[in-house]
Image (cartoon, grey):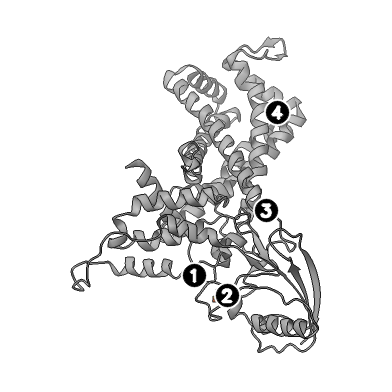
Amino acid sequence: MKITLKIWRQKNAKAKGKFVDYELNEVSTEMSFLEMLDALNEKLIISGGEPIAFEHDCREGICGCCSLYINGQPHGPEEKTTTCELHMRSFKDGSTITIEPFRAKAFPVMKDLIVDRNGFDKIMAAGGFVSIDAGSAQDSNSILIKKKNSDEAFNSATCIGCGACVAACKNASAMLFVSAKVSQFALLEQGKVEAKERVVAMVNKMDDLGFGNCTNTYACEAECPKGISVANIARMNREFLSAKLT
Amino acid sequence: MSNQEFTFTSLTKKITMAIAGLFLIMFLLVHLGINLLILPITENHKEMFTAAAHFMGTNWIVKAFEVVLMAAILIHALLGVILQIQNWTARGQAYKVKSKSTTSFMSKYIIYTGVMIFLFLGLHFYHFYFIKLGLVQAPVVANIAFPQEEHFYELAVYIFTNQLLYSVLYIVAFISLGIHLNHAFQSAFQTLGLNHKKYTPTIKFIGKLYSIIIPLGYIIIPLYFMVMG
Ligand code: FES
């Protein structure tokens, strides 16, 4: 298939970027989206050009490295699919694909399509951990956990921290990410001990970094490649309220 | 030191806004209940309306609530504007391709409908509330000066019958309110952490229903006088 790409090119964090058009004539529908970009980069390198910088690592939807805002959607048009899992069969022959970096003040562009998502690490460092001594492996029945809670904690923990929620949200809010991380701890016994301090610290850090405020439009949930539910945001709000009131 | 020592966190602002909003949502129902008495729904509707207006204007519990109400309006509006400004600046550079994400459609207009309602409130206060407070001279209609809430019935009928522009603005404001509530009702529950598999669909349904029925109830009143003269 033949495609036209409009890709955001930006030399470095300070440079003013612009969109550059590229034509690719022999794209296979079997190619993954990133393989298509690899092919373009090879072409660019051979012709002496600067390859397009984009982030990737696992290429199997688990690391959260890949980003890209493709045709108006983070991770492109497929539901619950990361950019690395996206395939060219999702696009029509002859179509134009616009690729932009994730946009948020808190995610500054470093080069081309790579943005600095360090903010998420800073939020995690503020409270996204358990620091109590959990001791050695417990007898499996010594801490009883409801199946529902362990399932929900697991679901929340499947957040790969890619930042699609921030990219999709019209307010560039990080609340889906933060709430998933708050939830994965708050639902389990070891995490409950520090739950109050954690939620307040993480919310404070999120605000400090300049992420927007959730207005419950739920674009984040619709775009999350892992299907993280906005019920997590409600849980974070609950956790926060109870931390402040008690 | 984090600057949150001096400012409120995003969640504190949101939660406060939701609580104020829910209070306003309840108030809308009370206000509508009284307003509907302007329509000839019973024989003594006028007396009932006047009695209700008198009660609202003199009862000390209601008066105490009036302070809460004004505070709720101001806090809700002020926090809404602060959050919105932060949200506008949080994106930085805009996307070239407009978002194709599935979102709650009406939520995108919440700030604009909010501003419309706020502006309308100014006009509404000028017409009724400020007269009650004695801040504004009531219009002299059919040789009756309207010194206080006893005459709100005549005042309302007069305005809806003779001031087409006000009636149209009134209707536009309540359509805005409907759009506002369509998103805001369920949003307030979510912000307060009340999201539950079993109950959230019901809350959303009630919210949609409320956002249609309440504004419609208000709109019927000027429509009646516009049609019936
Ligand atoms: S590259 Fe790891 S999730 Fe896409």
Looking at the rendered structure, whether the residues under marks 3 and 2 are on a common chain is answered as no
* Mark 1 C-beta to ligand 1 under 8 Å: yes
Q: Of the numbered discs in the image, which one, if any, rests on residue B160? A: 4
Classify mark 4: helix, strand or loop.
helix
Q: Nearer the viewer, residue A14 or A192?
A: A14
Q: Which quadrant of the view contains residue A26? A: bottom right
Q: Secondary structure at mark 1?
A: loop
Label 4 is found on which chain of the structure? B
Q: Which corner quadrant of the image does residue B49 belong to? A: top right
Q: Amino acid at mark 3?
A: Gly
Query: Circles 2 and 1: CB distance less than 8 Å?
Result: yes
Looking at this view, is B217 or A114 the one in front? Answer: A114
The C terminus of chain B is located in which quarter? Answer: top right
Q: Which residue, given by chain and number where applicable, does mark 3 sit on?
A: B92
Q: Which residue is mark 2?
A: A82
Picture residue at 67% right of the left edge, 43% below the top:
B112
**Residue A130 position within the rendered picture, expressed as x and y whole percent measured from the top left:** 33, 61
Visible in this render: residue B178?
no
Gap between marks 3 and 2, in whole Å? 24 Å
Q: Residues within 10 Å of mark 2 (few under 14, many from 20)?
A: many
Gap between marks 2 and 1 measured at Cα: 10 Å
Between A8 and A184, the one nearer to me in the picture: A8
C-alpha gap between disc 4 and disc 3: 46 Å
The residue identified by callout 1 is A160
User: Tag 3's secondary structure?
Assistant: loop
Q: On the same chain: label 4 and label 3?
A: yes
Q: CA distance from mark 4 to mark 1?
A: 58 Å
Tell me: residue B47, above or below residue A5: above
- Tell me: is circle 2 under 8 Å from ligand 1: yes
